[in-house]
Amino acid sequence: MTFTLTSNDLTPGGKLPERHVFNGMGYNGENLSPHLAWDHVPAGTKSFVITVFDPDAPTGSGWWHWTVANLPAGTRSLPQGAGSGKASLPAGAVQGRTDFGSAGYGGAAPPQGESHRYQFTVHALDVESIAVDENASGAIVGFNLHFHSLGKATLEVSYS
């Protein structure tokens, strides 16, 4: 079976709903992290990391919208709002710093008139935790998970 990522809130290839859009930078979204669920995890998985990345941001290096590291191996879903303080994360989970400058979920906010892709990815790791905290950038989280990846599953949506 293939490692899969699904959501009650997102449709693969679809448009990101307004409630998951950033509240700021000219947008009035709810900045609510979506429900995510994963299945058929790789054998030997000891933890998970969630990342949300916009490869289309006009920065030369994309834009990190959310990272959550050190999700326990038994975790198979996050409820809507878990990254926004509206629902709880599992004990031990750590949200890193987004490119908005703070830890937690930061919704879509492309420059007006542009359409961007948002890649929600769950990474299965061969360690129980990686050494990151709430100040860790998406690049640092990505660097640390790279060396322990057993597999990943991605769900991509867009927003304009």
Image (cartoon, rainbow, N blue to C red):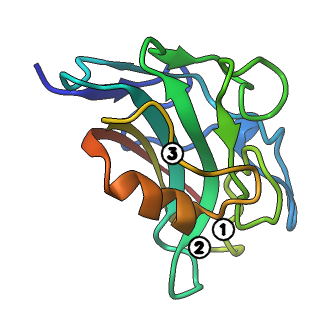
| Mark found first going from the N terminus, 3 or 1 | 1
Look at mark 3 in the image and give the residue it sits on. 130
Q: Which residue is mark 1?
A: 110
**Eye-nearest disc, 2 or 1:** 1
Mark 3 residue crowding within 10 angstroms, few (<14) / some (14–19) / many (20+): some
8 or 121: which is nearer to us? 121
Residue sitting nearer the eye, 24 or 59: 59
**In this picture, is 82 found above or below 107?**
above
Residue 113: x %, y % from top left: 65, 74
SS of the residue under disc 3: loop
Res. 115 visible in picture:
no
Residue toward you, 102 or 31: 102
Residue 132 in sight here? yes
Image coordinates for residue 126, horizontal then vertical, percent: 31, 35
Find numbered disc 1 in the image and state the secondary structure of the residue it sits on: loop
User: How far apart in space, not on screen, are marks 2 and 1 (Cα)?
Assistant: 6 Å
Say which residue appears at 55% left-offset and 65% top-offset.
140
The picture places residue 146, in percent across and down from the top left corner, at 34, 57
Q: Which mark is residue 148?
A: none
Judging by the rendered image, the residue that carries numbered circle 2 is 114
Q: Find out whether the residues at labels 2 and 1 contact each other: C-beta distance under 8 Å.
A: yes
Identify the amino acid type marked 1. Pro
Q: Earlier in the sequence, mark 3 or mark 2?
A: 2
Residue 20 image point, x, y percent: 70, 39
